[in-house]
Amino acid sequence: MEFSKTKLFALVSLRLVIGWHFFYEGMVKILNPAWTSKAYLLDSGGFLKEIFGWIALNDAVLWVVDAMNAWGLMLIGFSLLIGLFTNISAISGMILLFFYYLSHPALPGIEYLFPVDGSYFIVNKTIVELFALFVIFAFPTSQNIGLERFYDKAKNTRA
């Protein structure tokens, strides 16, 4: 896909800042052996509250969910930063953010223990970032600026 320099800069910048956000959030969790999503899951609201609560109270399941969350964030972010397998990463990131939203939907009447930095109704920062990943998926830039460019060339050369 061909983009003007301004459009390419905007799309690559969006990919990089979201990539950094995911990568950093994952690394902070991986490097902190005391980190767990237990309190966050116990604070869930909405129609899936019981499922998230069950995950939080089941140590084996919580351990798997915590590992998948931390490593998923880090790998998605790394992929977006280097521009390799970005479509898979964008979809994976959207799914992860959707689960975050299901855990803490911005719906009236639901109050959470953790403070939020704003007033939200249906749309919150999680949904905004989810749709930003959708833009990255819809307008891929890693063939222009990213390792996917070299991966595709090598794949085509072998074929």
Image: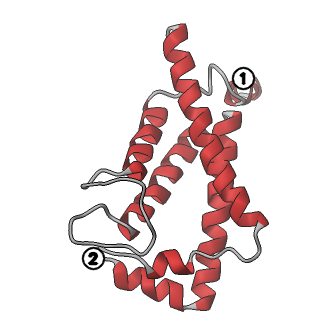
Left/right of residue 89 with respect to residue 124 in the rendered view:
right
* Residue position marked by numbered label 2 in the rendering: 47
Q: For numbered disc 2, what is the local secondary structure?
A: loop
Q: Amino acid at mark 2?
A: Phe
Crowd class of label 2 (few under 14; some 14 to 19; many from 20; radius 10 Å): few
**Location of residue 91 with respect to 11 vertically, above or below:** below
Residue 122's quadrant in the figure? bottom left
Q: Nearest the camera: 65 or 114?
A: 114
Label annotation for residue 116: none
The residue positioned 56% from the left and 45% from the top of the image is: 88
**Location of residue 48 with respect to 117 vertically, above or below:** below
Q: Nearest the camera: 102 or 154?
A: 102
The residue positioned 46% from the left and 56% from the top of the image is: 97
Residue with the most extreme bottom position? 58
Residue with the most extreme top position? 4
Asked if residue 1 shows in the view, the reply is no
Crowd class of label 1 (few under 14; some 14 to 19; many from 20; radius 10 Å): few
Left/right of residue 143 with respect to residue 130 in the rendered view:
right
Q: How is the image coloured?
A: secondary structure
Return the x and y of residue 134 as percentages of the image width and height. Answer: 42, 39
Return the x and y of residue 79 as percentages of the image width and height. Answer: 67, 42
Q: Amino acid at mark 1?
A: Lys
| N-term mark: 1 or 2 | 2
Residue 67's quadrant in the figure? bottom right
**Location of residue 145 with respect to 29 vertically, above or below:** above
* Residue position marked by numbered label 1 in the rendering: 153
Asked if residue 57 shows in the view, the reply is yes
Return the x and y of residue 159 as percentages of the image width and height. Answer: 71, 28
